Amino acid sequence: MKNTFFICLLLSLPVLGKAQKHELSLTYSPLSLYSIEKIVDGPYPSQDNYKVVGGINLDYYQYLNPWLKIGANVMYDKASVEGSRSRNYWMSSAIDPASRYKSTKHMFVIASQIDFEYLQHTKFKMSSGLSLGYANERLTNEGNTNNKFDVDGVTFHINLVSFRWGKKHGLTGNLGLGYKGLVNMGYFVRF
């Protein structure tokens, strides 16, 4: 009986060493949806200042088996623009000081996600996945048009390629399409 227990214990040591069932990561996307919107729209002559924070993501995963993990994601992004609107903008180059404006957009997303690891090495993992969740965007206009409104809806993100470099902690990143942006880089901890 003691020999069977000792053999089972020895055989389970490699499994126990890899039995980190939870993963937490914090990533940043310089190419978030608001950044891409700024690139695609380009500068407007009436805009003095356009700032984008970039997408900040907090991800939690729990492994269901060595290849499949499920989890949750929280994402935040912000963009603001300042400028001036002249009533006769196209006819006159004079800017009316009363036509100054500031617009701010905040995006908050909470989503469930699933990830499939198709390449597993002790210190390097690659995966693909899908996130589906609820998005809230708050738009605020100040200046000659003062108003606030919210836009709610369902959103998604497809992780085309994700990687984790490190055993218990290290560098993480992904390339995908959706609310997280095109590229994310950050740090993960597995416990």
Image: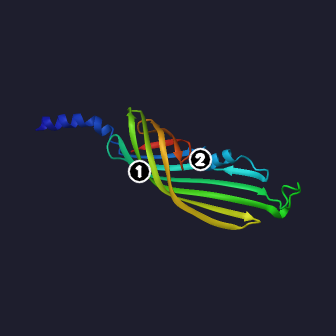
Q: Position of residue 155 (x, y in %)?
A: 51, 54
Give me the residue at 53% from left, 53% from top.
75
Q: From this viewpoint, which residue is outermost toward the left?
A: 1
Q: Could you say whether the residue bearing mark 2 is in a helix, strand or loop?
A: loop
Report which quarter residue 88 is drawn in. Answer: bottom right
**Earlier sequence position, callout 2 versus callout 1:** 2
Disc 1 is placed on an element classified as strand
**Above or below, 84 relative to 127:** below
Report the residue at 19% width, 37% height from top.
Answer: 8
Q: Which residue is mark 1?
A: 71
- Residue 79 drawn at (x, y percent): 65, 53
Q: Identify the residue at horizontal 64%, vertical 61% (top origin).
A: 139
Of marks 2 and 1, the one in the foreground: 2
Q: Amino acid at mark 2?
A: Ser
**Relative height, residue 139 to residue 3 (above, below):** below
What is the three-letter code of the residue carrying label 1? Gly
Nearer to us in this view, 176 or 70: 176
Figure quadrant of the N terminus: top left
The 10 Å Cα crowd at callout 2, few under 14, some 14 to 19, many 20 or more, is many
In this picture, residue 31 sits left or right of residue 20: right
Is 97 placed left or right of 142 in the picture?
Answer: right
Q: Which residue is mark 2?
A: 32
Q: Residues within 10 Å of mark 1 (few under 14, many from 20)?
A: some
